[in-house]
Image (cartoon, helix red, strand yellow):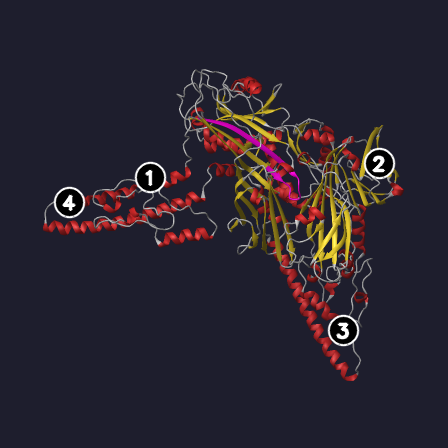
Amino acid sequence: MSRIRIEGLLAAFPKLVGTGKQHTYVETENVRYVYQPIEGLYLLLITNKQSNILEDLDTLRLLSKLVPEYSPSLDEEGVCKTAFELIFAFDEAISLGNKENVTVQQVKQYCEMESHEEKAHKLMMQSKINETRDVMKKKASELDKMRMERGKLDKGGYSSISGPRVIEKTFNDMSITGSGFGSGSGLGGLGMDMDSFASKPKGGRPSAAATAPGKGLGMKLGKTQKTNQFLESLKAEGEVILEDVQPSSVQSRASPLPPSDPVTVTIEEKLNVTVKRDGGVNNFDVQGTLALQVLNDADGFIQLQIENQDVPGLSFKTHPNINKDLFNSQQVVGAKDPNRPFPSGQNETPLVKWRIQGMDESSLPLSVNCWPSVSGSETYVNIEYEAAEMFDLHNVVISIPLPALREAPSVRQIDGEWKYDSRNSVLEWSILLIDQSNRSGSMEFVVPPADPSTFFPISIGFSASSTFSDLKVTGIRPLKDGNPPKYSQRARLVAANYQENLASRLPSLRHLAADRVGAPISIWRAEQSRRGEGILVVLAASIISKSGKALVSRQFVDMSRIRIEGLLAAFPKLVGTGKQHTYVETENVRYVYQPIEGLYLLLITNKQSNILEDLDTLRLLSKLVPEYSPSLDEEGVCKTAFELIFAFDEAICLGNKENVTVQQVKQYCEMESHEEKAHKLMMQSKINETRDVMKKKASELDKMKMERGKLDKGGYSAISGPRVVEKAFGDMSITGSGFGSGSGLGGLSMDMDSFASKPKGGRPSAAATAPGKGLGMKLGKTQKTNQFLESLKAEGEVILEDVQPSSVQSRVSPLPPSDPVTVTIEEKLNVTVKRDGGVNNFDVQGTLALQIENQDVPGLSFKTHPNINKDLFNSQQVVGAKDPNRPFPSGQNETPLVKWRIHGMDESSLPLSVNCWPSVSGNETYVNIEYEAAEMFDLHNVVISIPLPALREAPSVRQIDGEWRYDSRNSVLEWSILLIDQSNHSGSMEFVVPPADPSTFFPISIGFSASSTFSDLKVTGIRPLKDGNPPKYSQRARLVTANYQVV
């Protein structure tokens, strides 16, 4: 295909793509375009019209997974940088126009395959370097001889001959990853650009050392004219070219000035804001930190007196080692232990954190409005900013995304400076300082016609030298005799990046100005936000016959049986013959289907779902079905119905496809248990040991039988037992519960359920040690088995000791209900708390369940869930059945009757708050963790699990309120408190580990239970529906954590 032909096809594609449609292909008279948007680009396949659309979509999906592997930055610049890698990957995925049967990992492996030519080239380059090094050493020795000979005649020095030694060292340290150089005789091969061997000062001028020639021995280093032209062309394309600078100058600019005072206080607030395009604030959050840096240990015995502005919504949190009572009463930051100084060194130690919530749009430091308007063949964009008077803003950068342009936009008017980034298609508006003289400003520019939503989201970055809380340190109090040390303080407000869950679901996000002072504040596009809230779900996944008979159907939304059967029965009438379409649409739903022999695999989705995602889900299910139902007919599918439903549940969650493969689904459905394996190994070892002993005893008994047979011809019925037992052990499986013994082996007369299990404590049971009449044997763990279990314990495994079955049953099984009717009220917590304060998710889900001891309870007549009389419940809060003639089911199982949910609560309602303060000091990381419980709950069996970096030994726990355990296998430190009540509603723990990143200790998982609930729901009485007295009843309530994390 000629270049003109392919460029013409590609240029015609954007005109064919419609807006607001979810089709994944467009057809012309000759070709078919199959495409997929990837952020601001299109991944496109051009095929002939006779190709199979399913195969094309499969190829497109493979390429869409390959592109991010080789081009992490999905923009024009990132793709152009990795163009050759992408082409090589495409060649591995497609051969002669057909898709290869390869995976992403195989393509990566093939592309990284070693090349014989590359090896030969590297060897040749290395040999040239070695030859040149030998020549340089020879020249250096000749020059040394010349110097010695001349020194005899003249005492003058020759500084010019010291050059070769420097070059020799350069060659010794040199790598062969460069682009190579030409060859020549002697040192002629070194006449290339030496920028990679010697640094060049800024401005392109060669250094004096490089330009000063020796007496016939020097050489000229510098950029050639060709190199300069190449750099100029890159600059013209919008590339940022970093000029070579001296290392000293780089260091002086990058390194901050060291603190000059013994004590430095840093007060920083980070601003997280999400503003709507048409006005209003989605999120406005301020998080602040007070950090202390002390240079010397002697200056660490101090207390800080602070003051702050009274701001609504301001809440403080102190470090666990800070005296909270002193801080709350006098606003003094001091240590709990006055004999322990603040940490010293070059690292800052955070002492106090605070948060401000609930502020509105009027408190924004900077407001930006964008007004795009299309006029004829041009789009006029007017942008204005307005700054609040309370802040002077520095280094303000407002980044506006633009459509793809051939040249820079025409800026008609601007207050400040502007720069156009052609590679990212972004216009940056910069204002160095916004103060009283320029609280407002505007910019106007013109571009070709474009959709107004193209200019969003707008990103803003800035910094300020004052804060919202206006927190200050007014003085320092020394804790020892003497004058307080000198101190300095600095305050700053910066913009930090914050994304709501809604923003993370947007189809395309731009993160711009990340290298500016502070990350951007994002003004999200209103249309995208509304689009992101759409429900994209699979309603049902089914396998049906050609006639519409449902064999297996799994619904992922609330849907009645009549409704789903009606949808499935209507499908065969909608499917046409002789067509290659894979979906059919009705007024309300979309059918996405695939024939599998004489059946249909069918997805029912809503019409707003993404057809590409639906086809991907269908393809995954089509691979799963043969794995669980090898016989693809009605009988085979019905036999494996439950296995198929379990597999569908692993592949689809809440109507959305999970990111899993067929192997992962099989693994999840067949999940193995390590504890089960260990138990089976232990049981098998006991069986093998007992079998060996039984064989030995059988041989001994045979000998005894033969010896006695010589003396007496009588039979011995008692000694026939061992053979039977031996056979029993040979055929026995490890899933059984045991067996009785024969009359000849008295030692086997004990309970064999656990094969002479030991009671807890390591002492053998009486049954195991009681010998028979000279013929018994001892069963139990050998030393080898004990060593195996001990090694498992050393690796962090939890080994359950063998106990008598009766004791197991008494500990595991709950007590049977003593009353005829038992009501269970349970609430489950789902909480995600931010590490710096605030709640991401706070959800309470409750259930009221009923358990009836006997169905023949006089006067009770109910019906099972969900047929509860809703009108009766809503009007009188009475739980009763719609049909009074049908009782509640009886037995040992609980029947759920009412469920409820509580969400939207704030941080003040948390039953347990946990704060973690990691700080690095020298070659150690000190981690302080504290908890604080609410007064409304008494919490039982509290376990706080803190992830740790990989350690060779357990962490050093300095102080703890409770108990701790280190799980070396999972690298987790577990802090356990048996009961938290009024006597210990707060507590702390401190431990030390080697240096680690603070994020290593998150997320923290918390588990507990309580005997009261949030809703405080109770059953106040039971009304009999028939004559007689109401039955006795009991009720129990509990609150448990389903998922409680600090992230």
981 left or right of 697 in image? right
Residue 888 circle label: none
Where in the figure is residue 569, as x and y percent of width and height? 52, 18
Determine the secondary structure under disc 3: helix
For the question of whether residue 573 can be seen, the reply is yes
Q: CA distance from mark 4 to mark 2?
A: 109 Å
- Front of the two marks 3 and 2: 2
Picture quadrant where residue 434 is located: top right
Determine the secondary structure under disc 1: loop
On screen, 779 above or below 382? Answer: below
- Nearest the viewer among 321 and 675 is 321
Which residue matches tag 2? Answer: 384
Which residue matches tag 3? Answer: 161
Characterize the magenta stretch by its predominant secondary structure: strand
Q: Quadrant of the N terminus?
A: top right
Q: Residue at x 68, y 51 (%)?
A: 350
Where in the figure is residue 543, as x and y percent of width and height? 50, 25
Which residue matches tag 4? Answer: 716
- Amino acid type at circle 3 is Ile
| Of pointers 4 and 2, the one earlier in the residue sequence | 2
Q: CA distance from mark 4 to mark 1?
A: 30 Å
- Amino acid type at circle 2 is Glu
Magenta region: which residues?
Answer: 831-851
| Of pointers 4 and 1, the one earlier in the residue sequence | 4
- Front of the two marks 1 and 3: 1
**Within 10 angstroms of label 2, few (less than 14), some, or many (20 or more) residues?**
some
Which residue matches tag 1? Answer: 737
Residue 914 part of the magenta-drawn span: no
| Of pointers 1 and 2, the one earlier in the residue sequence | 2
- Amino acid type at circle 1 is Ser
- Front of the two marks 1 and 2: 1
Residue 838 part of the magenta-drawn span: yes
